[in-house]
Amino acid sequence: MSRCPLDACLRLPTIEVPLLVPAAAPLLFPLARRHALPDPEDFAYQVLSRVVQERDCWFRSELPARAWVCGLAMQVAQMHARPTSA
């Protein structure tokens, strides 16, 4: 069994959000700070929503869970960083 808490959460038959949040927080909140996002909680919520919705993609990717979640987080951060069109 993996020692990575994210990996353990994603391998459960059903994702349990109360376990997923503390497993992902040490990755997501520093990323939010690094990208100077105004609402780190909303950022984390959006990333975790994608994690729950797209978990099957993680299985197919064969990536480590932490790398896969980081990739999703970077996509969300880039969406937040784009200037809105007028």
Image (cartoon, rainbow, N blue to C red):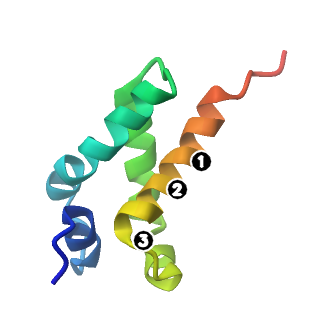
| Lower sequence index among marks 3 and 1 | 3
Residue underneath mark 1: 75
| Lower sequence index among marks 3 and 2 | 3
As drawn, the label of residue 55 is 3
Q: Are marks 1 and 2 in contact (CB under 8 Å)?
A: yes
Residue underneath mark 2: 71
The 10 Å Cα crowd at callout 1, few under 14, some 14 to 19, many 20 or more, is few
Tell me if residue 37 comes above or below residue 70 in the rendering. Answer: above
Q: Residue at x 51, y 75 (%)?
A: 57
Q: Report whether 84 appears left or right of 41.
A: right
Tell me if residue 64 comes above or below residue 42 in the rendering. Answer: below
Mark 3 vs mark 1: in front: 1
Residue type highlighted by circle 1 = Gln
Q: Give the CA separation, mark 3 to mark 1.
A: 15 Å
Q: Give the CA separation, mark 1 to mark 2.
A: 6 Å
Residue 62: percent from left, percent from top: 46, 82
Q: Give the CA separation, mark 3 to mark 2.
A: 13 Å
In which quarter of the view is residue 41 placed? top left
Residue type highlighted by circle 3 = Arg
Q: Residue at x 43, y 82 (%)?
A: 59
Mark 3 vs mark 2: in front: 2
Q: Secondary structure at mark 2?
A: helix
Residue 86: percent from left, percent from top: 84, 15
Residue 58: percent from left, percent from top: 46, 74
Q: Secondary structure at mark 3?
A: helix
